[in-house]
Amino acid sequence: MQSQYHNVWFINFSGIGNGIVIAPILRFFEKSYPETNYYHTENQILTDPWFLAKAGLKNLKGLSPLVWRRFKQEDWPAISLFIKEKNIDLIVNLRNEGPQYDTGYYRFKEEMYKKKAYLAFWDLDFRIIEHRAKHQNLTGDILEFFRAKDIDTTVYDPKWLNTIRKIRDSKGVGFGMAASQINKRWPTVKWIELARKIIAYSDENIILFPGQSEKEIEEAKLVIQDIGPKRCKLITNESIRNIALQIGELNYFISNDTGFLHMAVAIGVPTVGLYISTNAEIWSPYNKTNFFTLQNSFIAKCPDQKPHCGNCFHYYDVCPAIAKYGDDINPDKVYEIISRQLIC
């Protein structure tokens, strides 16, 4: 029998991709706990009423500051006040860091137990995750975690945005050049090489989706300068909703491991994922239909890996393996995959 919780706080990563992944899963939570209100770590997808309506979410009452996800001790007073003001009685941690790395959270949890606070905690099972021989998909772990809590996820639909897919009128190849961290970005010279092949051997135009930083936009402009603006379009300063609608018009999407990749997969656009610094076994989409993975094998050479997290300690700075070896994802291989659908 399920315990009844009144106000729940979901702790999660903050990326667009995390929002795309969790939105349909939160719908299952709502079905199992229809009277329960909940809050979630700040996320662009979960702030947009359009995405909330598409996911059918009704009980999300607010978002918590991004910095709180790490539970740094200096944030405990503000976090405790939030818990008190919102009458939170359950915290659900969806991050795959675990006790080994998510130390602030586990210290906070221990402190609440000592104080005998009226507060429950749900965490992924790191007794399994940290010690299994083969890494598994994080979305799969979350679904299994929910099922263990008697939340029915059997009809999970990862392609929950497919109603905006324009199959009949689809055109163009999208380049998901955006990535929150430079380690996750495929080099511009390789995007240019791939663009040349697409322009030379197909009738498809190229649509560039860089990130918002000045550096990312400059990199995208280099692609346009090389192949010319006639068959290349740059998408900038668009709302996240409009980006989704434009991705839905594409024939194909090629992307770094970033939110736009997960968006394209949720829409149902055939997608190639380029995993430069992250482990595709953990971070790729749960549903692999029309999804192709290319993994940089050199990340195995990083001396500072966080294996069950699917990245390394240099997520926010320069990964020594990438700095020394780069990546071994070849534009020829990417084109080989997409050419099955593009050649006229």
Image (tube, grey):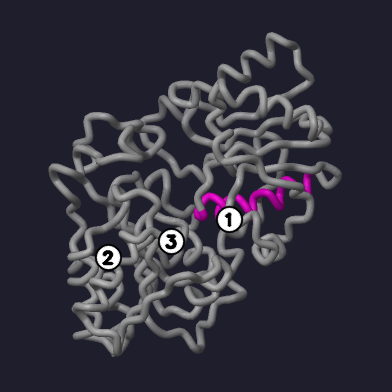
Q: Which residue is mark 1?
A: 44
The residue furthest front is: 214
Q: Which quadrant, please, contains the C terminus?
A: bottom left
Q: How many residues crowd mark 3 within 10 Å: few (<14), some (14–19), many (20+)?
A: many
Contact? badges 3 and 1 (CB < 8 Å):
no
User: Which sits earlier in the primary sequence, circle 3 or circle 1?
Assistant: 1
User: Which sits earlier in the primary sequence, circle 1 or circle 2?
Assistant: 1
User: Which sits earlier in the primary sequence, circle 2 or circle 3?
Assistant: 2
Contact? badges 1 and 2 (CB < 8 Å):
no
> Front-most of 294 and 210?
210
- Examine the image and state in which quarter residue 319 appears: top left
Q: Which disc, if any, is residue 319?
A: none
* Dominant secondary structure (helix, strand or loop) of the stretch shown in magenta: helix
Q: Which residue is mark 2?
A: 219
The answer to whether residue 223 is seen in the rendering is yes
The amino acid beneath tag 1 is: Gln
Residues in magenta, as a range: 16-32
Q: Secondary structure at mark 2?
A: helix
For residue 309, above or below residue 48: above
> Residue 282: image x %, image y %?
41, 43
Q: Which residue is mark 3?
A: 261
